[in-house]
């Protein structure tokens, strides 16, 4: 490869230089003959410029690794052109000396073309030599490849057996950690380094298990601790709002209403934390019974009637009668989270859709709004715990980021799922809950 590169580069440079010599000589001859006829000093200056280019080209070629005959021809060319240049510089344009000098251009052109021809011959010889060497190298490589195939196969089998099993064990351990399964230890056998990696994975598993337990305990404790005083605040706000303790003026009535609404909002956030802690502790179980899904959704919508009216939202509910076996409370929380989310992000006075229908052996619940919507890149992230997207409309209190996570967990516990669909031209967010129907439903 190195020889080919050098030969190619040398040939290209010599060829380019030879062509430039021929072009320079042709240009100088044309300018010199025009000068001889017209005697115009401008034409002589143009000749001088081409002469300078000719000299630069000759010097560039001299710096290359030329063959002996090429270097001899180049020297003859330089001497001949120097004689022509001396005559043109020393004598007037119409003297016999000038005429004699111009006749030398024919020989100079032949010499330059001879350099090109010799270079082409050298290229042909170099190519033949490279081809010969390439054939020898190819034969050597073929023999080496034939010899290496059995060795490569043996090494491949050996290292596959040696490394594949522990690598697979490490991969399974990492997937278990990613799925939140911290109770099963990582067992890695094989090379010492991979065994050491398995030990570090076990250390990481134990740390994650401890952190998960501490987080669950913290959520449970803080949720219970907050729920007791909040209940007192909420009941007090209700009493004030109902004017049980005495008449209130308009401003006091408004403040009491704000206290009541925000206490209800805090209660919802604390319930989300409690539900999440139950889910994470894996102690949650379903209490299935036969229920009317339409009535359940109607009940959820009734609890949000005040919020819908205060925001002047147009509820468009299309609910078919659907019955299935499920946990009523968990399904209520699932639907409530989706409806609350839609109300929170809907612009005032906009429509809000709630649909219930069946498809094949599944019940479908859809909740859609025309709010800011969910970017495509975030349509899976919104179901992650504590993840929150863009702020809600009208500056409402933002949630914990647990509602959608809890909804998906409860849907999956029933053998279904919650996904975000494309809302089409209306924009906004569109959530779809898929729940399997029972036989005979």
Image (cartoon, rainbow, N blue to C red):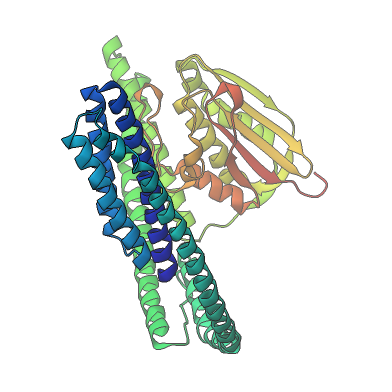
In the image, residue 402 lies at what x, y percent?
Answer: 44, 44
Q: Nearer the viewer, residue 66 or 325?
A: 66
Is any part of residue 168 visible from this angle?
no
Q: Nearer the viewer, residue 222 or 112?
A: 112
Residue 437 as seen in the image, left or right of residue 54? right
Q: Residue at x 51, y 37 (%)?
A: 376
Q: Nearer the viewer, residue 313 or 6?
A: 6
Residue located farthest toward the top when viewing the structure as drawn:
250
Question: Residue 132 occupies which quadrant of the picture?
Answer: bottom right
Residue 92 as seen in the image, left or right of residue 342? left
Q: How many marks?
A: 0
User: Is 227 drawn above or below residue 239 in the view shown?
Assistant: below
In the image, residue 134 lies at what x, y percent?
Answer: 53, 74
User: Is 348 drawn above or below residue 292 in the view shown?
Assistant: above
Q: Residue at x 58, y 89 (%)?
A: 147
Residue 233 as seen in the image, left or right of residue 176? left
Q: Residue at x 66, y 29 (%)?
A: 355
In the image, residue 139 lies at what x, y percent?
Answer: 58, 82
Q: Nearer the viewer, residue 259 or 383?
A: 383
In the image, residue 407 lies at what x, y percent?
Answer: 53, 44
Residue 40 as seen in the image, left or right of residue 138? left
Residue located farthest toward the right when viewing the structure as drawn:
440
Is any part of residue 190 visible from this angle?
yes
* Viewport quadrant of the C terminus: top right
Q: Residue at x 57, y 46 (%)?
A: 330
User: Is 90 drawn above or below residue 237 in the view shown?
Assistant: below
Question: Residue 251 occupies which quadrant of the picture?
Answer: top left
* Viewport quadrant of the N terminus: bottom left
Residue located farthest toward the front when viewing the structure as drawn:
96
């Amino acid at each position: 490869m190195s020889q080919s590169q050098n030969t190619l580069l040398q040939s290209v440079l010599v060829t380019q230089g030879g062509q430039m010599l021929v072009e320079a000589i042709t240009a100088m001859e044309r300018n010199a003959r025009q000068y001889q006829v017209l005697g115009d000093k401008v034409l002589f200056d143009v000749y001088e410029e081409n002469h300078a280019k000719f000299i630069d080209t000759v010097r560039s070629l001299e710096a290359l690794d030329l063959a002996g005959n090429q270097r001899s021809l180049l020297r003859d060319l330089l001497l001949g052109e120097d004689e022509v240049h001396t005559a043109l510089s020393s004598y007037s344009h119409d003297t016999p000396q000038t005429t004699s000098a111009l006749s030398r251009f024919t020989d100079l052109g032949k010499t330059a073309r001879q350099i090109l021809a010799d270079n082409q011959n050298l290229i042909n010889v170099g190519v033949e030599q490279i081809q010969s060497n390439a054939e020898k190298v190819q034969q050597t490589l073929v023999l080496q490849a034939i010899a290496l195939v059995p060795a490569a196969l043996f090494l491949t089998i050996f290292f596959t057996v040696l490394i594949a099993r522990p690598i697979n064990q490490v991969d399974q351990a990492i997937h278990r950690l990613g799925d939140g399964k911290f109770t099963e230890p990582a067992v890695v056998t094989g090379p010492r380094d991979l065994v050491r990696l398995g030990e570090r994975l076990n250390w990481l598993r134990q740390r994650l298990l401890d952190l998960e337990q501490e987080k669950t305990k913290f959520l449970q404790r803080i949720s219970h601790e907050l729920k007791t005083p909040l209940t007192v605040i909420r009941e007090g706000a209700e009493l004030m709002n109902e004017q049980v303790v005495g008449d209130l003026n308009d401003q006091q009535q408004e403040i009491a209403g704000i206290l009541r609404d925000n206490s209800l909002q805090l209660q919802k956030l604390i319930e989300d934390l409690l539900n999440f802690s139950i889910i994470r502790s894996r102690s949650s179980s379903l209490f299935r019974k036969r229920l009317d899904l339409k009535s359940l959704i109607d009940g959820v919508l009734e609890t949000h009637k005040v919020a819908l009216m205060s925001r002047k939202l147009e509820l468009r509910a299309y609910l078919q009668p659907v019955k299935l076996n499920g946990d009523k409370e968990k399904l209520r929380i699932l639907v409530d989270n989706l409806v609350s989310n839609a109300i929170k992000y809907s612009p005032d006075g906009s429509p809000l859709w709630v649909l219930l229908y069946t498809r094949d052996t599944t019940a479908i619940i859809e909740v859609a709004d025309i709010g800011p919507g969910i970017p495509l890149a975030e349509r899976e992230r919104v179901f992650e715990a504590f993840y929150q997207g863009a702020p809600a409309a009208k500056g409402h209190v933002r949630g914990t980021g647990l509602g959608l996570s809890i909804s998906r967990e409860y849907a999956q516990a029933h053998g279904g799922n919650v996904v975000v669909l494309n809302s089409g031209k209306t924009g906004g967010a569109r959530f779809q809950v898929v729940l399997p129907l029972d036989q005979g439903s």
